[in-house]
Image (tube, grey):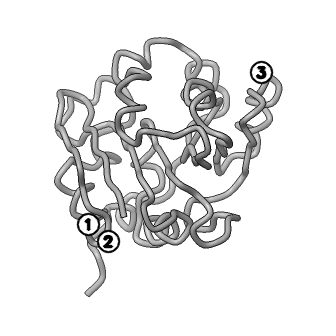
Amino acid sequence: MPLPFLREDMGFHTYPMERADNLEDSWRYEFCSVEELLALFDPAPGDAIADLGSGTGFYTDDIAPYAERVYAIDVQEAMGDYYREKGLPETVETVTAEIADLPFAEGALDAAFSTMTYHEFADEDSLAELVRVLGPDGRVGIVDWSAAGTGEEGPSLDERFDLDRAVSDLEAQGFEITHSSARRETFVLAAEL
């Protein structure tokens, strides 16, 4: 039986490049602090980590000091261009790719995280690809806009997942949820293989 992913109903969505400067605003910390994000997947100095839907690299910059290599992955080449123009930390490499088709060997990554982008890529193919590229003890941290929110910030409510749906979709791919929390506008979860 196919998994009931919202993406089949929602269609593909990306962040408008003309609004990319908004992704550099510290208001984003209102919804996810760096400490909270780090706690979700606990990066180690030798880790290879993927930022799934990195955009302009706002959170990638914050994670870069805690890993050997961070791959800033975005489907829009222009986002990578923006990030490179802004200036990349030495440990960061930009990658233009869809999450369903990542250019990494099986088990090449130790961890992955997504901040406010899960709703843009979460489908069966993307989550299966994430399982493929993560090592056997791979960790994932996700903070995203919740379907239970008001919709005043972020994408419209019909583009969002709720926490229970995200948990069940990840569990269906073999992830064990180690932490989850529903909040007013967002949800947070940590998982591992």
Nearest to viewer (mark 3 / mark 2): 2
Identify the mark at residue 160; answer none if there is no mark.
Answer: none
Q: Mark 1 sits on what residue?
A: 171
Q: Is residue 26 left or right of residue 20?
A: left
**Which quarter of the picture shows residue 165?**
bottom left
Q: Count every numbered label the image shows and give the total.
A: 3
Q: Is residue 148 above or below residue 56?
A: below
**Which quarter of the picture shows residue 45?**
top right
Comes first in the chain, label 3 or label 2: 3
Amino acid type, mark 2: Gly
Q: Mark 2 sits on what residue?
A: 174
Circles 2 and 1 in contact, beta carbons < 8 Å: yes
Nearest to viewer (mark 1 / mark 3): 1
Q: Position of residue 65 (x, y in %)?
A: 62, 27
Comes first in the chain, label 1 or label 3: 3
Q: Residue at x 41, y 58 (%)?
A: 122
Q: Position of residue 113 (x, y in %)?
A: 47, 44
